[in-house]
Amino acid sequence: MEEEASLMEDLEPPSCSHDSFRSKFYRDVTDAEWNNWRWQLKNRITRFDELEKFLILSDEEREFNMHSKTMFPVAITPYYMGLIDRENSKQALRRTMIPVVDECFHSEQESEDPLNEDADSPVSGIVHRYPDRVLFLVIDFCSAYCRYCTRSRIVGSRKTHKLDPMRWQKGIDYIKEHPEIRDVLISGGDPLTLSSNGLEWLLSNLRKIPHVEIIRIGTKVPVVLPQRINNDLIRVLKKYHPLFMSIHFTHPDELTPETQAACKKLADAGIPLGSQTVLLAGINDNVDTMKQLYHGLLKIRVRPYYLYQCDPIVGSAHFRTPVRKGIEIIEGLRGHTSGYAIPNYVIDGPGGAGKIPLLPEYVVGYEGNDLLLRNYEGQICRYPDKFENKISM
């Protein structure tokens, strides 16, 4: 009741970003319903016949439907559907959410679990790959399903987001038994689709473990379900500092007034916010798009953190770019904008190798004791490096 009552307190001033969409498709929906995150979840678009109500489907999108019984399911919140272009099947946000027949093409290099997370899972829900931190997968449900999802093998397998207290307790017990774990990343699925009570149970039990110093939450909810970031959720989150949040942003079109307001609430609650963006062919694989996204994020106090090379999950070839494209983007940002706007470009190494940073080559070599460096304009400068142990080229 407390969570539901807070909904009325959390209504933001009406935004023009969805006015025409709502008047066309949701004219009988009140502001209270539209701004209720549970209403948004209940009314997700999950079937192809529903998509045809909102979109003029392309041949590639229709052809996917012939295979959809065995493929990663579709789910889009009404809010996010309002950002998707009705006619243009090449629109960036549309391509991230609406499946096409290319997903049915699989190669030998692709895998359902390319990061080999299952092999590093000592108990259900825990991935312990790095020495001092674990990934805690607490739910297999998201409010919206990205077509390039690394965990599509487990995410979206159920239509409802029921909790699994036994799995949670096993994860908590494992963390308690391993004092080397100082950092816990709560992910899934999307943990912010949990009830406030469920999330508080997790956070409070993790905070009771003396050696857990930092708790992080990975989520896309502020982007696809900003209505969830209400006063009740903020009340819970701000009790468990130090708490960090990594938000999955893809494109500057996601920086709506609603998402900006959600990030403001989180930042005002003292939660450091970072962004995680997947590099996607034809969607955000150019400097101008990334610069617009990262500048927009900084204005709402979200620090660009990671730019991920798209993982080789099954059916992802049409999303993946050459690695050189990511390096070109970093090179196009370095020196041309502030350092705060430049993320770490990484490959999450296939087979469980972990995150591997990739950078343009700025070290040219040596002349005598001088280290030759290339700057962002291509100019060569010298640094007097008089130590014997020179950089291995």
Image (spheres, rainbow, N blue to C red):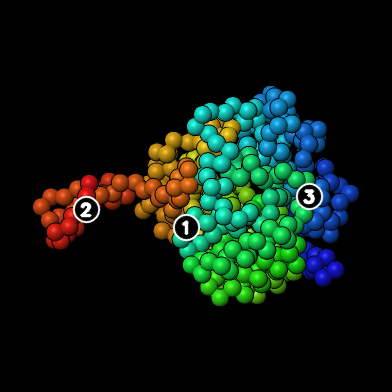
| Tag 3 residue | 160
Report the Cα–Cα distance between label 1 and label 2: 27 Å
Q: Name which residue lies at 47% across and 57% down.
A: 130
Please indicate whether residue 214 sits to the left or right of residue 97 in the image.
left
- Relative to 16, is 323 above or below? above
4 to the left or right of 379: right
Instruction: Mark 3 and mark 1 in contact? Answer it, CB < 8 Å.
Output: no
Rounded to the nearest angstrom, the CA distance separating label 3 from label 1 is 31 Å
Q: Earlier in the sequence, mark 3 or mark 2?
A: 3
| Nearer mark to the viewer, of 1 and 2 | 1
- Which of the two labelled residues, at mark 3 and mark 1, occupies the earlier sequence position? 1
Task: Give the mark nearest the N terminus, 1 or 2.
Answer: 1
Residue displayed at 76% across by 52% down: 161
Local crowd at mark 3 within 10 Å, few (<14), some, or many (≥20)? few
Q: Secondary structure at mark 1?
A: strand
How far across and how far down the image is residue 108, in percent?
A: 51, 29
Considering depth in this image, is 262 or 228 the residue closer to the camera? 228
In the displayed structure, 20 sits above or below 47; it is below
Query: Regarding mark 3 in the picture, which secondary structure is present there?
Result: loop
Q: Which residue is mark 2?
A: 391
The extreme left residue here reads: 368
Residue 35 x %, y %: 79, 58
In the picture of the structure, the residue carrying the numbered disc 1 is 130
Give the residue at the far right of this rendering: 28
Give the residue type that dot 2 points to.
Answer: Ile
Local crowd size for mark 1, using a 10 Å CA cut-off: few (<14), some (14–19), many (≥20)? few
Camera-side residue of 314 and 341:
314
Write down the quadrant of residue 266 in the picture. Answer: bottom right
Horizontal side of residue 356 vs 74, given as left or right: left
Q: State the CA–CA distance, disc 3 to disc 2.
A: 54 Å
